[in-house]
Structure formats: structure tokens, C-alpha cells
Image (tube, rainbow, N blue to C red):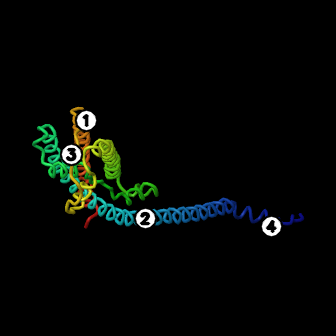
Amino acid sequence: MEKQPINQDQTIEERNPNEPTVSKKRKWSSYFKEFFMLFLAISLGFFVENQREAYVENKSAEVLAQSMLEDLERDRKALQEGIRFMEEKDQNMDKFLRMLRAPGEDWDTVAFYKSMTMVFSTFPFSPTDGTYSQMKSSGTLRYFDQRLVNKMNAYDNQLKKTIFRDELVEKGEWELVPIAATLINFEVTGELRFNKPITKETYIKIRDQDTLDLFINKVVTVRTMMGRSLQEYRAQLLLSEDLIKEIKKKYDS
């Protein structure tokens, strides 16, 4: 009987029936390892980048916190000086109003001029808010925790109220000027304001009781608005001290 030729492929297949399955498993295992290594490399890259960004943000926050601390220290000093100034001015205005309500023949002309000089003296508070404004515009406020950001925002909101009240006091003083200009010599108040000796004529011209009453009312208005401004200064000072304490607690080494 004649032998049939052996098919080589068939023989190999019969000899190794499981070889294709094993090959596929090895390929999938290799793919999985490559995918896992790629995933691990990407994850590690993200982790390193996040750590780097966190480090940069923390260092930037430290620098910004120190800068804002310096701003707040300047503000605190200015607010303390402003409060002392307004308290002294309020006492002088009280004496001045008592003088105005007394008989005119009892007035001391020089004391009158000195009191008027104090009425027109101002202590404009100019906040040092450059660091906060920079952080707000650049988005770097996000470097700080929300509690501290809330305190910064509260301080900034109070600043707006404090400055607004200052502007109202100044407006009230300017409204007083036209009446005061008919009663006294403003050149003398200018000399007194700059601690110069009086060289100009001193006079007081109260035409009638209505003029005096209007003048008193204007002075009272300025004093009342200044009292409200003083409250804002005190509130601002409390916020500045609280914010300074918080920043030092977290960032000051």
C-alpha cells in the first residue's frame, strides 16, 4: 500500500495543538506589561509635576504673605495714627462748638482760629494694598487656604467703607468752606496749619444769628461724619490686627 505524503503543517499542528493559544497569551501578557509601564510612567510624571507645582505655589505663597504682612503693618500704623488724630480733633471740635454757643464777646479770636484750623485739618488714610490687588488680579489668591482668603477679602471690603467715609468727611469740610470764608481770614488758618506765626489780620465776622446757626450746623455735620469715619477706622484696625495674626501664625517663621 502506497504511503501518503505527510503534510508538514498538519504534522506540526498535530504535534503542538496548544501553540497558538500560548503565543496569544504571551502577546497579551506583553501588551499588558507595556500598558502598565506606560500608565505607571504617566502617573509618576503627573505626581512629580503636581508636587513641583505645589512646591512652587507654597514658596510663592510665603513670599506674597510676607509682602502682604508688610503692607498690613503699614496700614496698622497709619490707622492707629488716624484714630489718635480724629479723637484729638473731636475734642477740639467739641470745645469749638461750646465756644460758638457762648456769647460772642467771650470768644478768644486766636483760639477761634486755632479751632477752625483743626476743623479743616484732615488725616487721609491711603491703604497699602498693592500686594492684595496683585494677588487678586493674577489669581494667586488660590495659593492660600479659603479661611485666610475670606479674611483678606473682608479686610479689602472694609477698606472701601473706610475710604468712602473719609471722602464724606472731606466733602462736608468743603461744604463748610464758603461759610467759613465769610467769617474769618483763611490766610491765618493757613499759617497756623503749618505752625507759622500769625502775620495776617485776624477777624471774626458773624453777620447775624442765622449765619451763626448755619455755621454751627455745618460744623456739627462734619463732626458727626467724622465720628462715623472713626468707627470705620477702628473696625479696619481690628481686621488688620486679626489678619496680621493669622498670616504670622501660618507663614511667619
In the rendering, at what x and y percent does residue 94 appear?
Answer: 15, 43
The quadrant in which residue 169 appears is top left
Per the image, the residue denoted by label 4 is 8
Q: Residue furthest left?
A: 106
Numbered badge on residue 51 = 2
In the rendering, at what x and y percent does residue 67 appear?
Answer: 34, 64
Q: Are marks 4 and 2 in contact (CB under 8 Å)?
A: no
Between the C-alphas of marks 4 and 2, the distance is 61 Å
Q: Are marks 4 and 3 in contact (CB under 8 Å)?
A: no
Categorize mark 1 by other alpha carbons within 10 Å: few (<14), some (14-19), many (20+).
Answer: some
Between the C-alphas of marks 4 and 1, the distance is 129 Å
In the rendering, at what x and y percent does residue 160 appear?
Answer: 35, 47
Please name the amino acid that badge 3 sits on.
Ile
Q: Which numbered disc, 2 or 3, marks the residue that appears first in the sequence?
A: 2
Numbered badge on residue 27 = none
Between the C-alphas of marks 1 and 2, the distance is 73 Å
User: Which residue: 30% across, 54% down?
Assistant: 125
Per the image, the residue denoted by label 3 is 204
Q: Which numbered disc, 4 or 3, marks the residue that appears first in the sequence?
A: 4
Between the C-alphas of marks 2 and 3, the distance is 74 Å
Q: Which numbered disc, 1 or 2, marks the residue that appears first in the sequence?
A: 2
Q: Which numbered disc, 1 or 3, marks the residue that appears first in the sequence?
A: 3
Which quarter of the image is occupied by the C terminus?
bottom left
Per the image, label 2 sits on a secondary structure element best described as: helix
Categorize mark 2 by other alpha carbons within 10 Å: few (<14), some (14-19), many (20+).
Answer: few
User: Which residue: 14% across, 40% down?
Assistant: 104
Per the image, label 1 sits on a secondary structure element best described as: helix
Between the C-alphas of marks 1 and 3, the distance is 12 Å
Between 226 and 111, the residue placed more toward the observer is 111
Numbered badge on residue 211 = 1
